[in-house]
C-alpha cells in the first residue's frame, strides 16, 4: 500500500512516517518546508526518513494544484494522511491569511485531487482546539464545537469541508482531534523547546494564565501508533476520534518535571490569560481505546524524560530555532 503523507517534515508527520515505515508501508512524503519554524530542522527530519528505501520525499506546496495533481498521477497513492497545516494559536492573530490558505485552501486542493484519483482512505488531523472552552469533562467527540481562535476555526471548516465533499464518494474518511502532542523532535514553538531554550540561555520564561492552563498532554509516539493502527480499521459511520491520554495536567506542574530531568531552571514570570487560549483541555479517549485497542498511554514523567534526553543529546541545537516565531 502506498501512502501519501502531507506535513511529513513536521513534528507529528515525521513520527508517523517513522511508524508507518516500521510497518513496511511505502511512503510518499510531501511538505513545502515553510519557514514558520526552522526549515533546517524540517530538512533534518527528512534526511533521517530518507535512510529508508521505502520513503520518497516531494517538496510541494499543497496550494499548487498543478504539481499536486501531477504527484497523484505519477505516484498513484492508495491512502492519504493529511497532516500539513499552519499550526499555532497566537500566531493566528498576527498572520491570519496563512491559516486560510494553508489550512482551508490547501485542504480543498487535496480533497479534489483525492477524489479525482480514487483514493481509498483519507485521514485528517484536525485539533482538540475545535471544542473551545468547555464546562463538562472529559470532552466527547459529539460535544458542540465552539472554536475561540482562527487556527481552530479553520480546522473546524476543514472538517466540514471533508464531510461534505466525501459524502457522495466511497472514500473512507477519518478525522482525528489530537490533544497537546509532545515528545522527541518537538516543535520549537511549543512549551518544551521554548522553555529549554530559555533555561539554557539563562533567560526568563513567561508563564501565561499564571500556569493555570490545563492540558491533556499526549506523547507523540502514542499518537503515531494510534494513527498507524487505524489503517486496519474499515469504514465507520461515526468518523471523528479524539486522540488523547485523558490525563490532564496543569502547565505549572509540568515545569518542575522539566527542571528535574534537564537539571536546569528558568526564572518564571507570571503573566495573565491570553485571549484565544483554551483554559482546559481534557478529552475522552474511550472510542480510540476500543477501536484500535490502544491502552498503554505513555505517562507524563516517562514522556518528559524521553523528550529532555533527546533534547540534551541533540548536537546541532541552533538548527531547532528560527526567529519567525517569538520564543
Ligand atoms: N502538535 C500538536 O500538539 C497538535 C495538536 C493537535 C493537532 N495537531 C495537528 O497535527 C498536524 C501536525 O502538526 P505538527 O505539530 O506536526 O505541526 P508542524 O508544523 O510541525 O507540521 C506541519 C507541516 O506542514 C507543512 N505545511 C504547512 N503548510 C503546507 C502546505 N501548504 N503545503 C505543504 N506542506 C505544508 C509544514 O512545513 C510543516 O512541516 C497539524 O495538522 C496540526 O494542526 C497538532
Image (cartoon, rainbow, N blue to C red):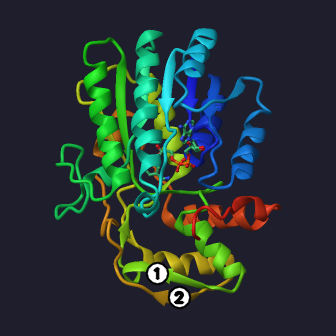
Q: Is residue 14 above or below residue 239?
A: below
- CB under 8 Å between discs 1 and 2: yes
Q: Quadrant of residue 249?
A: bottom left
The image position of residue 241, as x and y in percent, is 32, 39
Q: Which residue is mark 2?
A: 268
Count of labels shown? 2
The residue drawn where x is 41% and y is 23% is 111
Disc 2 secondary structure class: strand
Query: Residue 111: which numbered mark, if any?
Result: none
Q: Is residue 88 above or below residue 276?
A: above
The image position of residue 198, as x and y in percent, is 64, 79
Disc 1 secondary structure class: strand
Using residue 16 as the reference point, say whether residue 161 is left or right of it: left
Q: Residue furthest right?
A: 315
10 Å neighbourhood of mark 1: few (<14), some, or many (≥20)?
many
In front: 69, or 129? 69
The image position of residue 113, as x and y in percent, is 46, 17
The residue drawn where x is 67% and y is 83% is 264
Using residue 280 as the reference point, say whether residue 224 is left or right of it: right
Query: Residue 207: which numbered mark, if any?
Result: 1
Q: Quadrant of residue 15?
A: top right
Whole-angstrom CA distance, mark 1 to mark 2, is: 7 Å
Quadrant including the C terminus: bottom right
Sequence-first disc among 1 and 2 = 1
Using residue 82 as the reference point, say whether residue 194 is left or right of it: right
Residue 1 seen by the camera = no
In front: 7, or 247? 7
The residue drawn where x is 65% and y is 54% is 185
Amino acid at each position: 500500500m502506498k501512502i501519501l503523507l502531507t506535513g511529513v517534515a513536521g513534528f507529528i508527520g515525521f513520527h508517523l512516517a517513522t511508524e508507518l515505515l516500521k510497518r513496511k508501508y511505502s511512503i510518499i512524503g510531501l511538505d513545502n518546508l515553510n519557514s514558520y519554524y526552522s526549515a533546517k530542522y524540517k530538512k533534518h527530519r527528512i534526511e533521517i526518513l530518507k535512510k529508508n528505501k521505502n520513503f520518497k520525499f516531494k517538496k510541494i506546496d499543497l496550494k499548487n494544484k498543478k504539481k499536486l495533481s501531477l504527484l497523484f498521477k505519477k505516484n498513484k497513492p492508495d491512502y492519504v494522511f493529511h497532516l500539513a497545516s499552519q499550526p499555532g494559536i497566537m500566531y493566528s492573530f498576527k498572520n491570519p491569511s496563512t491559516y486560510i490558505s494553508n489550512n482551508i485552501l490547501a485542504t480543498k486542493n487535496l480533497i479534489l485531487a483525492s477524489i479525482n484519483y480514487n483514493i481509498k482512505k483519507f485521514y485528517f488531523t484536525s485539533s482538540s482546539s475545535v471544542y473551545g472552552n468547555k464546562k463538562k469533562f472529559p470532552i466527547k467527540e459529539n460535544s458542540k464545537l465552539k472554536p475561540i481562535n482562527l487556527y481552530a476555526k479553520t480546522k473546524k471548516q476543514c472538517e466540514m469541508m471533508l464531510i461534505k465533499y466525501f459524502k457522495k464518494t466511497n472514500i473512507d474518511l477519518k478525522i482525528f482531534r489530537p490533544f497537546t502532542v509532545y515528545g522527541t523532535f518537538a516543535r520549537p514553538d511549543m512549551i518544551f523547546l521554548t522553555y529549554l531554550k530559555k533555561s539554557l540561555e539563562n533567560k526568563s520564561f513567561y508563564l501565561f494564565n499564571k500556569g493555570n492552563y490545563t492540558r491533556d498532554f499526549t506523547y507523540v509516539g502514542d499518537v503515531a501508533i494510534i494513527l498507524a493502527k487505524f489503517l486496519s480499521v474499515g469504514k465507520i459511520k461515526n468518523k471523528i476520534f479524539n486522540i488523547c491520554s485523558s490525563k490532564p495536567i496543569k502547565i505549572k506542574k509540568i515545569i518542575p518535571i522539566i527542571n528535574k530531568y534537564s537539571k536546569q531552571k528558568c526564572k518564571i514570570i507570571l503573566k495573565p490569560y491570553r485571549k484565544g487560549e483554551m483554559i482546559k483541555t481534557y478529552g475522552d479517549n474511550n472510542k480510540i481505546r476500543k477501536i484500535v485497542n490502544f491502552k498503554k498511554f505513555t505517562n507524563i514523567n516517562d514522556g518528559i524524560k524521553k523528550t529532555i534526553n533527546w533534547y540534551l543529546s541533540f548536537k546541532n541545537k541552533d538548527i531547532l530555532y528560527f526567529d519567525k516565531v517569538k520564543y
